[in-house]
Image (cartoon, rainbow, N blue to C red):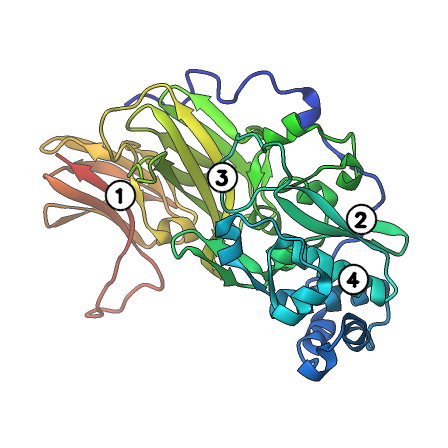
Amino acid sequence: MKTLRSTGSSVVSGISKAASATYKVVSPHIPRVGDEFTNIDTYALSVPRTAEATVALLAQNLTQTSRTEREKARAIFRWIANSIDYDDTAQRAGAQRQETAEEVLRSRHAVCQGYANLFAALAQAAGLEAKVVAGFGRGSGYWPGAAYGPNENHAWNAVRINGRWELLDCTWGTGYYDRYAGRTVRRFEPFYFLTDPGEFLYSHFPADSTYQFIRPSLSQAEHERLADLKPAFFRNELKLDKEKQNTLLFDQSVKIAFRTPSRAFLSATLERADGSRDEGATFCQREARDYSVYVVTSRAGEHMLRIFVGSKDQAVQEEAVVYRVTSRSGTGHPNNLPKVYLPFQTHGARLDKPFSGTLRARTIQHFSITVPDALNVAVMTGGAMVHLPREDDHFAGDVDLQAGPVTIAAQFGSKPQPGQEVSYEGLLEFQAS
């Protein structure tokens, strides 16, 4: 198998320097503290239905314990995200609705325009200056690299806090669209409240560039090429040195490097244009300061590369980055890379050899892997367990492979007592044939 290195351009050529520049926020952005709004949120969710008769009455009740403009905006944002249901039926029908704040308050459901109108009305009733911003949002139907079209497809808000304009999106604060279930799932997303303009811009492009609140501002063409970064990307403090565009072009294989905190790990899936998954096409591991994502395609064509981030103290991995990738060629077979199990990621293991997911049976194969904190590492093949010699955290040795699955597993924890049962956790799986 060839070294995993792009033999062609790893990105589409022709992007202007502005699209990958470091942007300067027009006015300093105030960092958010995770539990800053705990009391405000609790109060906003406790406001009784009797206080919701009119926009003015609701605004008065939501903000009566708020001491600052930020707290007023938060109380309104939190209440809307919890109380207004997204209208999936209207969205699927493609209905163009100009829902007033009063209509949304009465029906308790809306699409993005209604959410934005309600926030603006409540904010203004509470004495805040707020505007509805129209533009393009990278929502559930977005395909990286696609042109946005002639008409705006989303609406959100700008609100002036202590003399500075801030951005928020009540619609996306409500939850997310589950493409498998075909409906919106309610899950509060605080990322979209007073979001840093430089981060907000990756998913929102206002029709009026004034509401980008960055210098230099981006053109629509430049924005269409930006990487598709999700809230989890910023929440987990990931960084991209390269591949800041959302479309990658390569000849069969490519490697993408991320800077990540030590607590974070990445995983990835590769989907074809028809929605089927290219099995064994991705492999992720930490390498020095970077976390590397390797991709080897089985056939040429367009794919969707989804990269997820997780951590030892986080039960669910979240989608962090999505790329549209086009490979000029493919290997012609699946399982190009090893299958990864969760302990490989959570223990920060690193594979040196072999890198191919498909191995030759009835041959001697050299294995080399680093597994921090492991007591023992073994290769399981054909019903046999072969322990690899150890040097510090590194384990390496030769194994006679039998046809079928080949698993690298590790023993963790304290050294077992005599007669005590020993358990191993799977790290990687290969196929030998």
The type of residue carrying mark 1 is Pro
Left or right position of 62 against 247: right
- Image mark for residue 322: 3
Which is more foreground, mark 4 or mark 2? 4
Work out how far the residue at label 2 is from the one at label 3, CA to CA, in angstroms.
27 Å
Q: How far across and down, in percent of the image, does residue 225 sit?
A: 59, 28
Q: Which residue is mark 1?
A: 389
Q: Residue at x 82, y 75 (%)?
A: 60
Work out how far the residue at label 4 is from the one at label 2, CA to CA, in angstroms.
24 Å
Query: Could you classify mark 4 by the number of other residues whose Cα lies within 10 Å: few (under 14), some (14-19), or many (20 or more)?
Result: many
Q: How far across and down, in percent of the image, does residue 314 sit?
A: 49, 60
Q: Residue at x 76, y 54 (%)?
A: 31
Is residue 313 shown to the viewer in this render? no
- Which of the two residues, 383 or 357, is positioned nearer the viewer here? 357
Q: Earlier in the sequence, mark 2 or mark 3?
A: 2
Are the two marked residues, 4 and 2, in contact with CB atoms closer than 8 angstroms? no
Q: How far across and down, in percent of the image, does residue 306 sit?
A: 44, 41
Q: Quadrant of the N terminus?
A: top left
Q: How far across and down, in percent of the image, does residue 67 sit?
A: 86, 71
Q: Earlier in the sequence, mark 1 or mark 4?
A: 4
Is residue 364 shown to the viewer in this render? yes
Q: Earlier in the sequence, mark 4 or mark 2?
A: 2
Please, what secondary structure does the residue beneath circle 2 have?
Answer: loop
- Which of the two residues, 432 or 69, is positioned nearer the viewer here? 69
The type of residue carrying mark 2 is His
Which is more foreground, mark 2 or mark 3? 3
Which is more foreground, mark 1 or mark 3? 3
Q: Which residue is mark 2?
A: 29
- Image mark for residue 121: 4
- Image mark for residue 126: none
Work out how far the residue at label 1 is from the one at label 2, CA to CA, in angstroms.
53 Å
Q: Is residue 261 above or below residue 270?
A: below
